[in-house]
Amino acid sequence: MTPLAGQVALISGAAKGIGLATATRLARDGADIVALDLAGSDVSALAAAVAEAGRGLEVVEGDVSTPEGWDAAVAAAVARFGGIDILVNNAGISGPFAPIERYPIEDFDRVMAVNARGSWLGIRACIPELRKRKGRVVNISSTAGLGGPPTISGYTMSKHAVIGLTKMAAMGLAADGIRVNAVCPSPTDTDMMRGLEVGRSDAEARMIRARFEADCPLGRYAAPEEIAAAIAFLAGPESSFVTGAILSVDGGVKAR
Ligand SMILES: NC(=O)c1ccc[n+]([C@@H]2O[C@H](COP(=O)([O-])OP(=O)(O)OC[C@H]3O[C@@H](n4cnc5c(N)ncnc54)[C@H](O)[C@@H]3O)[C@@H](O)[C@H]2O)c1
């Protein structure tokens, strides 16, 4: 089954984690992949996965918080594959954990620039190409975009902004046949969550993980592939009447 045969997916932050799982899944579903990730990112796993799926890969080094990064990615997609069918706004950073009065302002600005401005710039840059192909956009928000975790104000605000972006873009682009949806993952087994364990003792690391797992009715972290499956659904033909949707993929976290 290759529901995306002949299509082109531009995925930000595809070098690892959820982005890598998404690139792997969409390539297996038949899409050629354009990956936008930071300069110096290790793309060996990505290259191997896309090659194994028998699809083409174009890697563009750039920062999603800059228009130049997106312009380069769109230009590469058009030059190599002739256009863009799917945009996955996946690149994101967590920023520090601190109460609001001690949260560094420069960290706040950076988290908003990557997660919120970066997603907005991505849609903005891709609209002309998406319009030609009745494209689809999948934005990656978070359960933090639906609630108010108290110590990650930059992340929480940025992921709420992604929800707002999803709804307004879905409304604004529907007449062009472009669908825009968001996925809200709960803690997922990637370097972003593992980063919370860095520099801690084994016991502390286990406790951090156990606390998040206890908060999840299904009692575990998501696998990146489980998030990628939801993204593939929203990027593919099976979701043809879905736009403006905010899909929790969270083991029941937001059912509480
Ligand atoms: N892991 C989780 O628990 C979790 C939960 C909910 C939502 N998310 C969201 O899912 C997305 C992917 O997270 P992940 O866990 O795979 O993260 P990750 O840290 O494993 O990977 C992030 C990728 O994005 C790239 N990236 C970071 N900043 C960038 C920038 N400015 N420009 C271009 N590329 C950049 C990184 O180089 C990396 O390849 C993020 O938006 C994140 O907020 C993650």
Image: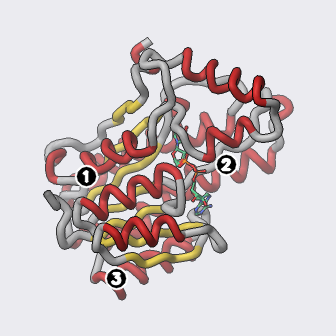
Residue 121 appears in view:
no
SS category of the residue bearing label 3: helix
The CA span between labels 2 and 1 is 26 Å
Residue tagged 2: 111
N-terminal-most mark, 2 or 1: 2
- Using residue 129 as the reference point, say whether residue 252 is left or right of it: right
Asked if the residue under mark 3 is in contact with the one under mark 2, i.e. CB atoms within 8 Å, the reply is no
Residue tagged 1: 179
- Using residue 95 as the reference point, say whether residue 46 is left or right of it: left
Residue 105 appears in view:
yes
SS category of the residue bearing label 1: strand
SS category of the residue bearing label 2: helix
- Using residue 70 as the reference point, say whether residue 96 is left or right of it: right
Residue 211 percent location from the top left of the image: 63, 18
Nearer-the-camera pick, 79 or 1: 1
The CA span between labels 2 and 3 is 29 Å
Which image quarter is the C terminus in?
top left
Residue 190 percent location from the top left of the image: 56, 44
Q: Which labelled disc corresponds to residue 239? A: none
Under mark 1, the amino acid is Arg
Under mark 3, the amino acid is Val
- Residue lying farthest right? 102
Residue tagged 3: 78
N-terminal-most mark, 2 or 3: 3
Residue shown at 52% from the left, 51% from the top = 17
- Using residue 100 as the reference point, say whether residue 158 is left or right of it: left
